[in-house]
Amino acid sequence: HLRYIVGSWHADGCLEWARANVDGELRCPEKIGRAAQMVRYRDFNDSGVSVQDGLRFYDGKKSTMPVMHSYGGVCGAISKFGASACQAFGVPAMPVGQPGHCAMIWRGAEGEWLLEN
């Protein structure tokens, strides 16, 4: 399961940000997967740019964890953010691509794999 911890989509700086900024009540193996819910679901940014326009949605900024948290996104951003939050706390997780959707799985405290988003 180590590859689902160290194989993060985000750089070390983002994982450090997650350790400092994930909601306190989520910082445990039983709840960390719910950190995905820290990214608000939205199709358009404040300027009306669609999330389907790639980095334009983020005003040309790299899609780091702080940027995703600030701007929001749809299923891919939510799942990547949640998986990286898990990984920042040593919990195996990964985004799971599906037809027309992206979910995430994370390993719960009892060793079971849980689905989020």
Image (cartoon, rainbow, N blue to C red):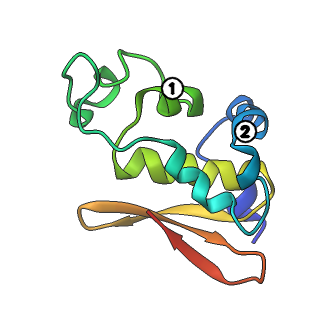
x and y percentages locating residue 27 in the rendered image? 77, 53
Inspect the image, locate mark 1, and give the three-letter code of the amino acid beneath it. Val
Label 1, label 2: how many angstroms apart (C-alpha)? 13 Å
- Would residue 7 be visible to someone looking at this image? no
Quadrant in which the N terminus appears: bottom right
- Residue shown at 52% from the left, 33% from the top: 69
- Residue shown at 28% from the left, 20% from the top: 46
- Would residue 12 be visible to someone looking at this image? yes
x and y percentages locating residue 41 in the rendered image? 35, 44
Secondary structure under the numbered disc 2 in the rendered image = helix
38 or 95, which lies in front?
Answer: 38
Asked whether, in this view, residue 39 is left or right of residue 73, the answer is right
x and y percentages locating residue 58 in the rendered image? 37, 22
Label for residue 5? none
Label for residue 15? 2
| Residues packed near mark 1 inside 10 Å, few (<14), some (14 to 19) or many (20 plus) | some
Q: Is residue 108 above or below residue 29?
A: below
Asked whether, in this view, residue 100 is left or right of residue 10, the answer is left
- Residue shown at 69% from the left, 43% from the top: 23
Quadrant in which the C terminus appears: bottom left
| Residues packed near mark 2 inside 10 Å, few (<14), some (14 to 19) or many (20 plus) | many
Inspect the image, locate mark 2, and give the three-letter code of the amino acid beneath it. Leu
Label for residue 67? 1
Asked whether, in this view, residue 1 is left or right of residue 63, the answer is right
